[in-house]
Amino acid sequence: MEKRAAMHILSTLAQGVDPHTGETFPADSPYQHPDTVRALFQAVQAMADPAGRPRPGAQAIPENAGKPWSDEEDNVLAEAFDAGKPIPELVEHHRRTRAAIQARLVRLGKIEPPADPPRYRTGLPAAQAA
């Protein structure tokens, strides 16, 4: 497997998304546990630069990535979404990934889950990616 493909898979897992189906993992999945999310993000960063130097333009891990949602945060998210706030603004305000915001909006009944979730490409033929 190429390094780029491995990094993509790890990054997708860290965002709480199955890299092969595009589906968001349930909240009780080990991939949604805060320590797992942080470990996966650190693995991606280490693969990107084994010397530990920050890459120019490297994405920072959102501060609340992988942390549990409180009832209060759910209410704030729902109210902001109902008020028409765009997803990128919600991502910044809650300091979470886009996938986490979308998954939470599905859980709160604010949006429908994707009927045909996107598939994440690894850059490898399907037979090799499995």
Image (tube, rainbow, N blue to C red):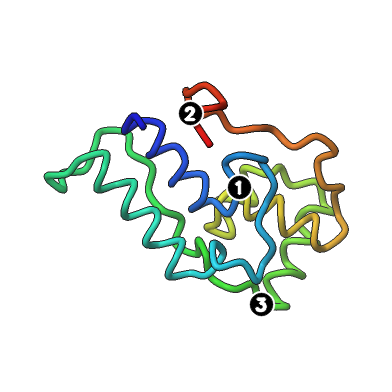
Farthest residue in the front direction?
127
Dot label at residue 110: none
Q: Which residue is mark 1?
A: 18
Give the Cα distance between marks 1 and 2: 17 Å
Residue beneath the point at 87% across and 59% down = 109
- State the image coordinates of residue 92 (x, y, percent, origin top left): 55, 51
Q: Which residue is mark 3?
A: 70
How packed mark 2 is, by other alpha carbons closer than 10 Å (few <14, some 14-19, many 20 or more), is few
For marks 1 and 3, the one nearer the N-term is: 1
Q: Which residue is mark 2?
A: 128
Q: Is residue 62 above or below residue 66?
A: above
For label 1, the SS is loop
Residue beneath the point at 26% across and 39% down = 48
* Quarter of the image with the N terminus in it: top left
For marks 1 and 2, the one nearer the N-term is: 1
| Three-letter amino acid code of the residue under disc 1 | Asp
